Image (cartoon, helix red, strand yellow):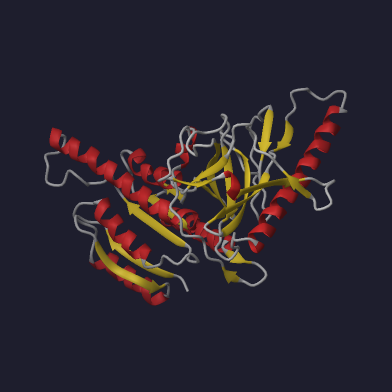
């Protein structure tokens, strides 16, 4: 059953309703409150975000889909309450308040990731929407699903805005549901790093931020359709590679997988071998345990699927090459090569997928349920696709 909590955004946050079922009784209580107690006081984000974080932590089970919805009619009052508007102190306090709000949203989003939708609905006429839009920008960067809306000030517009949030919640529930059994799956409890950070390459491995595997703790294999077992031994991409290291925090989270930045390391287990950066992918869910049997099936199926897709892409490109009147600038399709690594630490072995890290802006054409998203835009000359 869905439950609802409501926090009044004031100088001091008030948790007016906590974990109430979404029934007509709850709805009527909200209407009564709106009619008898109109909004007032300063609209401070930080106390409300702190209260929201406390409530979300009480629902920290990995199988709960979450929504943090902010209704606001103006910019935050944090840091400037009681100060002369436009004064130096007010401006400094306002800047500090905005910085603290970004930090709070980043912390919440990094903890709950994709199963949390952070929504901001601007009510009325906001003078500077970019200020409150920062909330959803930061949330998206730290792994949460983010929605920023400025609906028209009528019943239809507000209804549509809440409909968007409800749809996002439904989508989250769907992707967390095991289709054959209809059971809500549990997402791994991890803290995510901001997506914007991946543009800075790993130059030296920090043992406090990474998990490091030495050479004897690593087995590398790759798919080979001609091999009797379909997989053969593989070697690292750089001759100086001795070990392997991945960051503790994932930077990406899809409907099924978590993605971590990783590198090959030299014998000192700190210096990066070569100049290539990689992505390590594991299952997002705890029930698809990465320790040996279940994890091995997961990664081998992934590698097999990617190889089949690569062969289909090559055949597609070959057919394009045979078309005499086709513009040579027509995009071709390629799939990234991937390998499977067995990593052993403290007597336990896990299976992971590793592929090259590709930077850039990418568009996903369909979701895991087969729903396609169609847009009209100028195609790039080269397309890189990875599941």
Task: Give the number of callouts.
Answer: 0
Specify whether 38 is left or right of 326. left
Q: Is residue 82 above or below residue 116?
A: above
In the depicted view, which residue is nearer to us: 38 or 189?
189
Seen in the picture, residue 62 relative to 321 is either above or below; the reply is below
Q: Residue 73, percent across and down?
A: 30, 49
Front-most of residues 245 and 5: 245
Q: Give percent across and percent down for residue 386.
A: 66, 42
Dividing the picture into quadrants, the one containing residue 83 is top left
Whole-percent x and y of residue 102?
33, 44
Q: Percent position (x, y) of residue 216?
A: 60, 47
Residue at position x 32%, y 46% in the image: 103
Q: Residue furthest bottom?
A: 25
Query: Is there any visible trace of residue 123 in the rendered image?
Result: no
At x 43% / y 40%, what residue is drawn? Answer: 206
Q: Is residue 106 visible?
A: yes
- Left or right, 356 with respect to 346, comes to right
Residue 61 position by quadrant: bottom left
**Residue 7 higher or lower than 139, as above or below:** below
Q: Residue at x 35, y 67 (%)?
A: 5
- Answer with the quarter of the image where residue 241 lies: top right
369 versus 89 height, above or below = below
């Amino acid at each position: 059953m869905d439950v609802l909590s409501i926090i009044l955004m004031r100088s001091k946050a008030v948790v007016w309703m906590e974990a109430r079922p979404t029934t007509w009784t709850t709805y009527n209580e909200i209407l009564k409150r709106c009619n008898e107690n109109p909004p007032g006081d300063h609209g401070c984000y930080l106390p409300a975000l702190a209260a929201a974080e406390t409530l979300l932590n009480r629902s920290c089970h990995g199988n709960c889909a979450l929504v943090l919805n902010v209704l606001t009619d103006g910019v935050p009052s944090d840091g400037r309450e009681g100060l002369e508007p436009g004064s130096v102190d007010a401006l400094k306090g306002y800047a500090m308040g905005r910085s603290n709000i970004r930090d709070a949203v980043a912390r919440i989003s990094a903890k709950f990731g994709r199963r949390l939708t952070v929504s901001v609905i601007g009510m009325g006429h906001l003078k500077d929407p970019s200020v409150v839009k920062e909330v959803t920008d930061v949330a998206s960067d730290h792994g949460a699903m983010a929605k920023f809306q400025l609906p028209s000030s009528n019943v239809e517009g507000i209804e549509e805005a809440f409909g968007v949030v409800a749809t996002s919640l439904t989508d989250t529930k769907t992707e967390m549901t095991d289709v054959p059994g209809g059971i809500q799956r549990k997402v791994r409890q991890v803290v995510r790093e901001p997506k914007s950070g991946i543009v800075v390459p790993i130059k030296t491995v920090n043992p406090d931020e990474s998990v490091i595997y030495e050479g004897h703790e690593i087995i590398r294999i790759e798919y080979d359709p001609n091999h009797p077992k379909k997989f053969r031994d593989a070697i690292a991409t750089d001759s100086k590679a001795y070990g392997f290291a991945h960051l503790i925090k994932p930077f990406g989270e899809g409907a099924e997988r978590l993605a971590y930045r990783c590198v090959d390391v030299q014998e000192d287990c700190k210096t990066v071998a070569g100049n290539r950066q990689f992505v390590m992918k594991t299952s997002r869910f705890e029930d698809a345990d990465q320790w040996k049997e279940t994890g091995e099936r997961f990664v081998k199926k992934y590698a097999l699927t990617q190889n089949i897709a690569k062969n289909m892409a090559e055949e597609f490109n070959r057919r394009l090459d045979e078309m005499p009147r086709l513009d040579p600038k027509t995009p071709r399709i390629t799939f990234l090569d991937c390998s499977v690594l067995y990593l052993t630490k403290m007597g336990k072995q896990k299976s992971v997928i590793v592929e090259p890290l590709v930077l850039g802006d990418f568009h996903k054409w369909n979701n895991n349920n087969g729903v396609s998203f169609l847009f009209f835009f100028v195609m790039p000359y080269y397309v890189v696709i990875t599941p």
